[in-house]
């Protein structure tokens, strides 16, 4: 079965995710309206500007349909701004920003501060055994609190932010602070596509 995976296409690096998904054998579909959302098996929320995407979710009347599909268990993967949107609590954001409550976590926007505003590092990623993942952080968030049912998949290995949580999964919803779609390493996308082909039991 070829899963149809939507990429939320309101703002951000949509094209890179579409390419990565296609390269993993999925059928990528741009999602801008509720009818398109209804027709996909899973959804990628790309990086970009989370407050802008939040506003556009409202304008395009996608907010409630998306919350509904997440409640019903649709697999989703959010990168950077996408991670922020999937959280149930966001720090350092606008008071009117919407959250999708896909993962029980508190995320801080633009968390790494000026010194390491944007940076790259290699990190160990649970579930990916064949070597570390090159992680590109661009004005990235971090996970400040991960709920009891949230599995931590990766942390920053060293430097001033050592130990910080930067990849998580709860059920079939996954999020990373960084952008695997820009490195050509398809393993994170493949891991997500796997959850559609073989949903994780008991979640
Ligand atoms: N700083 C952005 C935000 O708050 C996220 C950056 C990104 O997605 N690369 O939405």
Image (cartoon, rainbow, N blue to C red):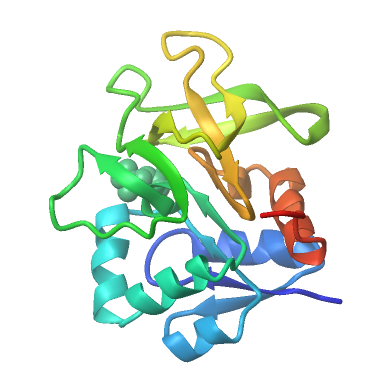
Q: In the displayed image of the protein, which residue is found farthest to the bottom?
A: 35
Q: Position of residue 112 (x, y in %)?
A: 35, 24
Residue 134 placement: quadrant? top right
Q: Position of residue 181 (x, y in %)?
A: 61, 50
Q: In the displayed image of the protein, which residue is found farthest to the front?
A: 202
Above or below: residue 66 compared with residue 85: below
Q: Position of residue 148 (x, y in %)?
A: 51, 34
Q: Residue at x 41, y 9 (%)?
A: 160
Quadrant of the image for the N terminus?
bottom right
Above or below: residue 147 compared with residue 94: above
Above or below: residue 188 compared with residue 27: above
Q: Residue at x 13, y 51 (%)?
A: 95
Residue 136 placement: quadrant? top right
Q: Position of residue 185 (x, y in %)?
A: 73, 43
Q: In the displayed image of the protein, which residue is found farthest to the top?
A: 159
Q: Nearer the viewer, residue 193 or 183?
A: 193
Q: Residue at x 14, y 58 (%)?
A: 96
């Amino acid at each position: 079965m070829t899963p149809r995976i939507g990429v939320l296409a309101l703002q951000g690096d949509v094209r890179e995710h579409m390419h990565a998904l296609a390269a993993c054998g999925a059928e990528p579909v741009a999602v801008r309206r509720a009818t398109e959302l209804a027709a996909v098996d899973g959804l990628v929320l790309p990086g970009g500007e989370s407050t802008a995407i939040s506003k556009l979710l409202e304008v395009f009347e996608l907010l409630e349909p998306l919350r509904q599909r997440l409640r019903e268990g649709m697999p989703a993967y959010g990168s950077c701004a996408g991670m922020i949107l999937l959280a149930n609590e966001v720090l350092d954001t606008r008071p009117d920003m919407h959250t999708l409550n896909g993962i029980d976590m508190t995320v801080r926007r633009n968390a790494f501060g000026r010194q390491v505003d944007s940076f790259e590092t290699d990190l160990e990623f649970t579930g990916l055994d064949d070597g570390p993942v090159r992680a590109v952080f661009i004005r990235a968030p971090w996970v400040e609190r991960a709920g009891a049912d949230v599995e931590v998949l990766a942390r920053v290995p060293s430097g001033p932010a050592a130990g910080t949580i930067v990849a998580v999964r709860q059920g079939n919803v996954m999020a990373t602070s960084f952008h695997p779609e820009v490195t050509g390493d398809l393993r994170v996308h493949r891991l997500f596509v796997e959850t559609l082909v073989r949903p994780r039991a008991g979640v």
